[in-house]
Image (cartoon, rainbow, N blue to C red):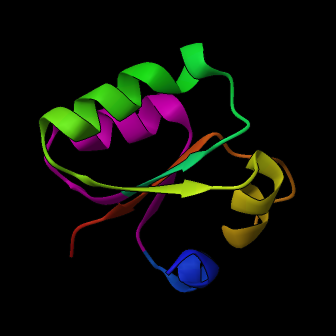
């Protein structure tokens, strides 16, 4: 699933946008980079758990960004519901 991120049409990259998508009920799966700073990802992770959104942990921000087809690292990414 992680390797297929760049093939997804509906992606949200970044903690603010991820949190918004989760709160609005639009998130299917949340990806969190394990090496992201905890204070950055904590609120997104807590909201996802509260709303029972699937969470996948990824080894690094660099790998998560690359999987999304961007040149920079990403702390969180959300695949939106269809």
Asked whether residue 38 appears in the rendered view, the answer is yes
Residue 51 is left or right of residue 30, and the answer is left
Residue segment shown in magenta: 10-29
The answer to whether residue 68 is left or right of residue 48 is right
Quadrant of the image containing the C terminus: bottom left
60 drawn magenta:
no
* Image x and y of residue 37, in percent: 68, 22
Going 78% across and 61% down the picture, which residue do you hit? Answer: 63
Measured along the vertical axis of the image, is residue 45 above or below residue 9? above
Residue 9 is situated, as x and y percent measured from the top left of the image, at 45, 78
Residue 4 placement, left or right of 9: right
Q: Is residue 50 left or right of residue 40?
A: left
Task: Tell me where residue 29 appears, x and y as whole percent.
Answer: 34, 61
Q: Is residue 23 visible to us here?
A: no
| Quarter of the view holding residue 28 | bottom left
Q: Residue at x 56, y 39 (%)?
A: 14
Instruction: Name the residue located 20 percent from the left edge and 54 percent from the top edge.
Output: 26
Question: Is residue 73 placed above or below 41 in the rendered structure?
Answer: below
Q: Nearer the viewer, residue 48 or 6?
A: 48
Quarter location, residue 48: top left
């Amino acid at each position: 699933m992680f390797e297929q991120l760049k093939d997804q049409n509906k992606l949200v990259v970044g903690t603010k946008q991820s949190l918004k998508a989760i709160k609005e009920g639009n998130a299917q799966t949340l990806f969190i980079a394990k090496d992201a700073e905890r204070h950055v990802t904590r609120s997104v992770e807590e909201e996802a758990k509260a709303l029972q959104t699937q969470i996948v942990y990824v080894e690094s921000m660099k790998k998560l960004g690359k999987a999304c087809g961007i040149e920079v690292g990403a702390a969180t990414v959300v695949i939106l519901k269809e």
